[in-house]
Image: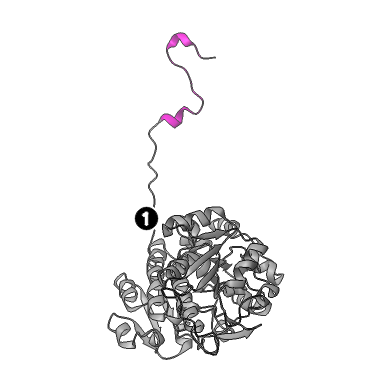
Amino acid sequence: MDNPQSGYIKFSGSESFLPQEEMLEVARSKAKLTIGVPRELDPNENRVSLVPEAVALLIANGHRVLIENQAGKSAHFENTEYSEVGAEIVYSHEEVFKADIICKVSPFSCEEIEMMTPKQTIISTLHFTSQNEGYFRKLISKKVTAIALEYIKDKTKTFTILRSISEIAGNTSVLIAGEYLSNTQYGKGIMFGGLSGITPTEVVIIGAGTVGESAARAAMGLGAYVKVFDNSIYKLRRLQNNLNERIFTSIIHPKVLTKALRTAHVVIGAVHTSKGRTPVIVTEEMIREMKQGSVIIDVSIDQGGCVETSHPTTHSNPVFQKHGVTHYCVPNISSKVPHTASYALSNYFGPMLLSIGESGGVSDMLKTDYGLRNGVYLYNGILTNKYVGEYFNLPSQDIDLLIAAFMH
């Protein structure tokens, strides 16, 4: 035992008090990305994922961008606008799919999946309720990493890209409703809003999220009488505060909702869920009690729809009638205003791709970026979205565990 009289006490592991080498962080190496932007094959998809200004920024940071011939034409961006900022214009779909990262808006087709190669990263919308089991099995076999735009979150845990597109969808849905309400074939020749001395248009909005708030703001601006339904008191209160006006709000109670639907001219389904398919809120029996010539805009259709009588339609054939009620159920409503929507998408695509390059690649970015990780539904061919797995009875794994495993 050490003698305390000596003035020295022996510590276990005393070598830890000796000068040590300083551990410095190794500088993260940047990645030079090759980014491909294919032309959309879906005739109803007019948006493009990157506008020329975003491409210029990527190229200025040392990345290579391949733009397929006429990829931006439907959104009114010409080839010359891309080539002038340094993009390479390629003339085949196959050439674009040689890139490290493929960015598009609509879901990838089965033909496009055939062109994919292992370790590639694909980014697009998912709309998984419009797919089938075989689609995902084919994607899995390609061993790619797939990211869904609608599931990406920002630092505040908000669905950042979805919010921007939802604002456009909410505003546009009101303009579309006005178009069909005034139509003598699908509506009753009613002007949206109303005039002095005439009862205003009644609009029922189901969902008090971003789409619902944007739709309410646009409808009120045109003079409509708006009723908003949602099961979240917090969302209803927030919507009223944001609008700075007391409007009719209610939780989704079947009797109250049915009563509102009976007198409604327009119904906007604006329900969003982070857990697979949206619940059906408006039943077929409720539809039967609505006015002849009234209009339903089911913005929720990209997640299955919140109206029982809804089924997906296209921009070339957008509406159908059921029980005398006109249904508009186009999944990509913002594609109706493609120039604006393309800028909204590119505002997120551009910085996200720059961050991926700064991080050293997609895999390195996923290690530290929870928001981007939330958008991953396939990681190197492994299904990581449990809702997709449950919907199609496919095995899935937790993305956080997979990332941790690959880190080691």
Using the image as rendered, state which of residue 49 and residue 223 is in the foreground.
Answer: 223
Magenta span contains residue 179: no
Q: The N terminus is located in which quarter?
A: top right
What is the magenta range? 1-17
Using the image as rendered, state which of residue 291 and residue 42 is in the foreground.
Answer: 291
- Residue 48 place in picture, x, y as percent: 42, 80
Image height of 24 relative to 329, above or below:
above
Disc 1: which residue: 27
Image height of 251 relative to 18, above or below:
below
Instruction: Farthest residue to the front: give it.
Output: 197
Q: The C terminus is located in which quarter?
A: bottom right
Q: Residues within 10 Å of mark 1 (few under 14, many from 20)?
A: few
- Residue 244 place in picture, x, y as percent: 41, 57
Residue displayed at 34% across by 76% down: 55
Instruction: Farthest residue to the left: give it.
Output: 84
**Is residue 101 in sight in this rendering?**
no
- Residue 338 place in picture, x, y as percent: 41, 81
Q: Quadrant of residue 193?
A: bottom left
Residue displayed at 55% across by 66% down: 376
Callout count: 1
Instruction: Farthest residue to the top: give it.
Output: 5
Q: Quadrant of residue 283?
A: bottom right
Using the image as rendered, state which of residue 95 and residue 47 is in the foreground.
Answer: 47
Circle 1 SS class: loop
**Is residue 26 in sight in this rendering?**
yes
**Way the structure is coloured:** one colour
In the rendered structure, the answer to whether residue 352 lies left or right of residue 276 reads left
Which amino acid, mark 1?
A: Ala
- Residue 344 place in picture, x, y as percent: 40, 72
In the rendered structure, the answer to whether residue 9 lies left or right of residue 128 reads left
